[in-house]
Amino acid sequence: MSLQSAVYAVIVLALIAANLPFLSNRWLLLWPAGVRSKPLWGRLAELVLWYFIVGAVALGLEQHLGQRYPQGWEFYAITAAMFLTFAFPGFVLRYLLRR
């Protein structure tokens, strides 16, 4: 896997993972939420968990492709902001569009 294809794969994975909590009523796509749908706090907690899962995949790809570079707090602040931006379409579909 080349560096460019790894970057595209992580971006696509982040786009999908950021929207999963808002598009699915199952907890982590495994367990049903019960009679009612998941509450907002549950969706946000799941969003944070998906952020760390995507980060772990990206870290593994970086380590596989070469040397791992140390990152400061700025890197994590920017990636968290990007992940929240990626989650916006799912949030709009779940909460802002009238059904």
Image (spheres, grey):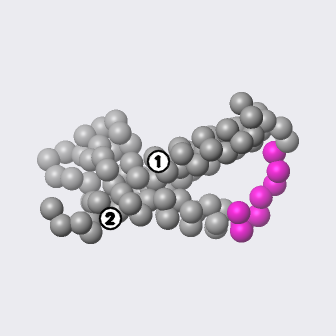
Query: Quadrant of the image for the N terminus?
Result: top right
Q: Of residues 58 and 33, which is closer to you in this image?
A: 58
Name the kind of residue labelled 2 in the image.
Val
Q: Is residue 43 above or below residue 28?
A: below
Left or right of 72, for residue 55: left
Return the x and y of residue 52 as percentages of the image width and height. 56, 50
| Label 2 Cα neighbours within 10 Å, binned few <14 / some 14-19 / many ≥20 | few
Judge whether 82 appears above or below 46 on screen.
below
Residue wearing tag 1? 17
Give the side of residue 10 with respect to residue 93, left or right: right
Q: Which comes sooner in the sequence, label 1 or label 2?
A: 1
Q: Which residue is mark 2?
A: 92
Residue visible at 56% across and 67% down in the picture: 81
Residue 71 lies in magenta, yes or no?
yes
Residue 56 makes an appearance in the image:
no
Residue 8 forms part of the magenta stretch: no
Farthest-out residue, right: 67
Residue span colored magenta: 68-75
**What secondary structure characterizes most of the magenta part?**
loop
Farthest top residue in view: 1
* Callout 2: SS: helix
How far apart marks 1 and 2 lie (CA) works out to 15 Å
For the residues carrying marks 1 and 2, which lies nearer the camera in this image?
Answer: 2
Q: Position of residue 33 (x, y in %)?
A: 24, 46
